Image (cartoon, coloured by chain):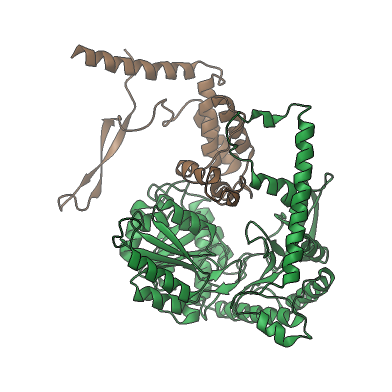
Amino acid sequence: MARRLAYTTALTTLFSYGLLFAFGQLRDLFRHLLGCFRPNKDDDVKQGYAPICVGLEDFFVRRLYLRVQDCFGRPIASAPDSWFDVVERTSDDNNKTLQRTSKTTRCLNLTSYNYLGFAAADEYCVPRVVDSLKKYSASTCSARVDGGTTKLHTELEELVARFVGKPAAVVFGMGYVTNSATIPCLIGKGGLIISDSLNHNSIVNGARGSDATVRVFRHNCPAHLEKVLREQVAGGQPRTHRAWKKIVVVVEGIYSMEGELCKLPEIIAVCKKYKAYTYLDEAHSIGAVGRSGRGVCELLGVDPADVDVMMGTFTKSFGSCGGYIAASEEIVQHLKHTCPGHLYATSMSPPAVQQVISAIRVVLGEDGSSRGAQKLARIRENSNFFRSELKKMGFEVLGDNDSPVMPIMLYNPAKIPAFSRECFRQKVAVITVAFPVTPLLLARARFCISASHTREDLTKALDVISRVGDLVGIKYFPAQRPKIAEAGHGN
Amino acid sequence: MLAISTAFDVVERTSKDNNKTLQRTSNTTRCLNLGSYNYLGFAAADEYCTPRVIESLKKYSASTCSVRVDGGTTKLHNELEELPARFVGKPAAILFGMCYVTNSAIIPCLIGKEIIQHLKHSCPPHLYATSMSPPGVQHVISAIKVILGEDGSNRGAQKLARIRLRFLQVRAQEDGF
């Protein structure tokens, strides 16, 4: 069900952006006029050439983003556990520049992708990581195919394949290139990529770099996917109308800006019908959903054999860095021979590899305790509790049950810094997300729930968010109109 | 006569299935190296570079294990960005830890259909990739200083002259045929 935006909210949001835009243009006009009377570095632009890095995006940064940049990129001074230390910053030029102070504020952390709580010290993981640091050093400083493969890398690839239920896996040191450098190796000219409209930038860049034709289907809509597939299969390649060499449908397990679970069973059924391959990005879902943390396949009852390529990252649930591709032996061998992320990039740091190995062992229960199962149960309980309470309070909450990512809609640009600053003042750290990461009218705040949050933590957070929500005016579905509230929630 | 080019030890391999698979042996052969991009000879130990690299290894460790915008920028990274800018004659420079992505991730940031999506500070290898290894950075700093003559000797000028002279020798031999 499509999200319905109230007309008054849309009008006030457009008016606000229009006002900011006009005011910014006015300031730019004055800057340009005053600039005529004194030389500046703008004169470096060659006559007749288009600028390389100015334009609307530069305007956006100068006139819109800088005004509120204190709400973004806040440095922290401790591990991102359920509570962390946020560094305080000051500005004496209206946020044009920010200076760090040595003071910190202890805040409740609703911002980190710390789904299972492995971002902080863990009794099982840390001793093993320290040992691997002593044995293997901090970095191989080599590519995988040079001197950058240790026993740990091999062990992790076997463990990941077993964990997600595929025959083989390859790991990369950088989550972003797991997509952006892999997709061009799997499909090329004469191929077709059908991508969900809200896929991550790394997927978009990988698809563009592949030379395949790219088509987009409506977000998480299997019916529209089938329509696109039918049209493309019937029409064939552009101009020649020959059959596509191969078709790959790319989806994500949890969409990080929506908190929404992929409709995977329906999408798999459509792909099988039209003989398209599936590529599933589980960057957020692996470790965070499913009874034993194996992601959306486990949660939604899909056999991993039905998904051709499974991608994930270690940066969220496992408290480390890098990512993996799990697939058939043939695909993994092909990637190891052709993927620049494997051939040229520094391999994943051995202690970081050990961290993932240890975290997966905890999740699998192979550490000799039930802490993994407890973590998984707690994140599910915490997520569903927090989501239901937010809805009761009248917020417009996106996403699905069981998802630890919980966006609430803000819409108006003035509410973005207001919500962020007021929550920060009351020692709750939140992330606000706006254009260009989201569409212009759909700014939001996003909460990420962790297994390390206690019920008391969540209750305190809800209390603060409720008060700030009243103050800022973002309870778009107040409790006294329950029917409208129910209809407006969509999923 | 000029010194001979760098030689190296090549590992010998055997195959029992007509090269379908190869096995490494412990035998090596000392060979004249015409295969490496070792134009100025910095791929081997160097009297100026190596001690400084070892010092930076002790001081900064083998890797920052962080991205540039997190904890991955050291004084060496800042120094190295100033040095290539001066060396090539441009106002500024930015460095990446992987030469492949210097092209593959930069061009999408400079031009594109939806250029608004590529803010100039949204370049993936700067935001997400591990920063260049500090000893690697120090090695480049030292090598550039040798070339610029800032190591207090004229070895850089000699290296540049020598690589050019060797090319002329080859041309002379060809003419001789």
Q: Position of residue A293 (x, y in %)?
A: 52, 76
In the rendered image, residue B149, in percent from the top left (x then y), is placed at: 54, 18
The quarter in which the C terminus of chain A is drawn is bottom right
Name the residue rendered at 69%, 49% in the picture. Answer: A60
Give left or right: position of A480 versus A42: right
Q: Which of A60 and A388 is in front in this view?
A: A60
For the residue pair B100 and A324, the one nearer the viewer reads as B100
Residue A281 seen from this side: no
Q: Evaluate whether residue B47 shows in this view.
A: yes
Residue B139 % position (x, y): 51, 33
The image quadrant of residue B173 is top left
- Left/right of residue A332 with respect to residue A388 in the rendered view: left
Q: Residue at 75% across / 35% down in the picture? A: A32
The residue drawn where x is 45% and y is 71% is A225
Relative to A174, residue A224 above or below: below
Total numbered circles: 0
Q: In this view, does A169 lie above or below A135?
A: below
* In-front residue for pair A340/A146: A340
User: Compared to A486, does A86 lie above or below?
Assistant: above
Chain the render paints brown: B
Image side of residue A198 versus residue A10, left or right: left
Quadrant position of residue B91: top right
Task: From the top left corner, tell me how far across and down residue B58 is, in percent.
Answer: 57, 40
Image quadrant occupied by the N terminus of chain A: bottom right
The chain painted green is A
